[in-house]
Image: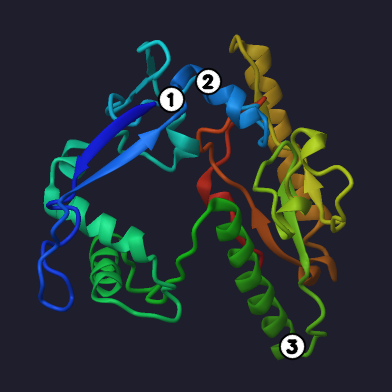
Amino acid sequence: MLLKTYPLKGILADTRPDGGKFSIMTATIGTAIAPADVHDKLAEHLLTDGFKLVLDTRASQGSWIVDARTDERYLDMYTFFASAPLGLNVPGVVEDPEFMGLLAEIAANKPANPDIYTTHLAEFVETFVRVLGDPALPHLFFVEGGALAVENALKVAFDWKSRRNEAAGRSPELGSKVMHLKHAFHGRTGYTMSLTNTDPGKTARYPQFDWPRIDVPALTFPVTDEALAAVEGGREAGARAGQGGFRGQPARHRVLHRRADPGRGRRQPHARRVPVGDAGPVP
């Protein structure tokens, strides 16, 4: 059995809510599973078709992942599906006891932000707007997870398109189709099941909407003049399909959204040229 002792000072407050003092300042956490046994133990209850290493959450740093079984270092070009762009154990984060204490305080309570408000949430929102905000887009919606972000973006688009059609005297039932690209992965939640079309096993046997799907030009390697010409030809064909096949009356009123993502670190079979500006509502 491996025992690790962590000091709580700087992670939990020294003073209890009633004004008294905490008498225990260390916590002992027992880990009975050695790194070499992690995959076998997980496989008893979980699907373990991910990477064949065990992340050392302490030794890994920056863009280098350390395998806890062998101490081997790997250059991280994965970043947890691009959700950790700053890397691991960022010095400006883990070496700041006050900030680490704040993270522990929030993690220990995990308030439901849509219903319970805190000074921490207010400070985050204020900072987010100051650093990344756009005065033309003052309203924010936060959600955990890429697929759920797609889901909620689609719901906003459905609502917007329905109201736009109704205001123009058309049926509000129109505007329920999402044009998307072949070979795309957008998640495996409700609406995204109708958009994801990579490995068939990801969506097989689940109900899906019959939404328009168009070809996407894919660059193959090595990059030759023929490969580049094929990409250009595919891009032109996709543009014709989008502008001709789906923009004609009344189809343009049925398609509410073009959905396209740039690469996000996921293992994909194609390298694509997809300008970010190609995604957006269809007027």
Question: Type of residue at label 2?
Answer: Asp
In front here: 255 or 107? 107
Looking at marks 1 and 3 on the same chain, the residue that comes earlier in the sequence is marked by: 1
| Percent position of residue 7, x then y | 17, 44
Mark 1 and mark 2: span between their CA atoms? Answer: 25 Å
Residue 20: quadrant of the picture: bottom left
In front here: 181 or 193? 193
Residues at marks 1 and 2 touching, judged by CB atoms closer than 8 Å: no
Task: Judge the density around disc 3: few (<14), some (14-19), many (≥20) Cα neighbours within 10 Å.
Answer: few
Residue visible at 69% across and 73% down in the picture:
158
Residue 77 has which mark? 1
Tell me the quadrant of the picture where the C terminus can be found: bottom right
Q: Mark 3 points at which residue?
A: 166
Residues at marks 2 and 3 touching, judged by CB atoms closer than 8 Å: no
Task: Judge the density around disc 2: few (<14), some (14-19), many (≥20) Cα neighbours within 10 Å.
Answer: few
Question: Type of residue at label 1?
Answer: Met
Q: Mark 2 points at which residue?
A: 37
Residue visible at 65% across and 65% down in the picture:
154
- Helix, strand or loop under label 3: helix
Residue visible at 43% across and 15% down in the picture:
69
Colour convention of the picture: rainbow
Q: Is residue 33 left or right of residue 109?
A: right
Looking at marks 2 and 3 on the same chain, the residue that comes earlier in the sequence is marked by: 2
Residue 265 has which mark? none
- Helix, strand or loop under label 2: helix
| Percent position of residue 129, x then y | 29, 68
Task: Judge the density around disc 1: few (<14), some (14-19), many (≥20) Cα neighbours within 10 Å.
Answer: some
Q: In this view, does 60 lie to the left or right of 219?
A: left
Mark 2 and mark 3: span between their CA atoms? Answer: 60 Å
